[in-house]
Amino acid sequence: MPSPIGHALGGIAAGWGSVPRRNVAAAAALAAVAIVPDLDLLIHDHRGFSHSVGAALIAGAVTWVVARSPRWALAVTLAWASHVLLDWMSNDTRPPLGVMALWPFTRDYYKSSIEVFPAVSRRYWLAQFWIYNLKALAVEVLILAPITAFVLWWRRPAGVRQGSDRGQTRV
């Protein structure tokens, strides 16, 4: 399962095109939303219903009601769903394997046959804990940072896109 850094990058990449205003606060909000599904670790029910499309839709619906913004609702839904996707494409070492991706329609667990992301160890007492997790983090950053950077560049504000940072004015 990816680290919080990997999930943050994925959430920003997934939701960036939908946020009404693209700024640091929006990026931070998307990153936080993408990390939230892992709070289920606190109740020892990791990869349960919080790691599902249903939970992503609920998060989006709550955002729509609270923020009254369909664009923020979509951005939150996509950022949350990115967590489900990244965990689905990762190495899983603890049963039940996979994520409950299609909850509430089914409580079955799903796992991709292609493992893109290595598992992250939570066994902090082992000597190789830091080495193992730094390797996993390096893989996440090598894959997700370029994707996120491209999305940020591609979906940048119109003024930046048209060269206003070089003294040109928009018409």
Image (cartoon, helix red, strand yellow):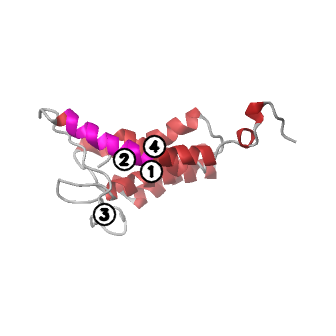
- For disc 4, the neighbor class at 10 Å (few under 14, some 14 to 19, many from 20) is some
- Relative image position of residue 31 (x, y in whole percent): 46, 40
Check disc 4 and report its element: helix, strand or loop: helix
Residue under pointer 3: 114
Mark 4 or 2: in front is: 4
Of the numbered discs in the image, which one, if any, rests on residue 23?
Answer: none
Residue range highlighted in magenta: 130-145
Q: Is residue 39 visible?
A: no
Mark 1 or 3: in front is: 3
Q: Residue furthest front?
A: 166
Check disc 3 and report its element: helix, strand or loop: loop
Q: Is residue 139 visible?
A: yes
Residue contact between numbered discs 2 and 1, judged by CB atoms under 8 Å: yes
Q: Amino acid at mark 2?
A: Pro
Residue contact between numbered discs 2 and 3, judged by CB atoms under 8 Å: no
When the figure is inspected, residue 77 is found, relative to residue 30, above or below; the finding is below
Dominant SS in magenta: helix
Residue under pointer 2: 37
Residue under pointer 1: 80
Q: Quadrant of the C terminus?
A: top right
Q: CA distance from mark 2 to mark 1?
A: 7 Å
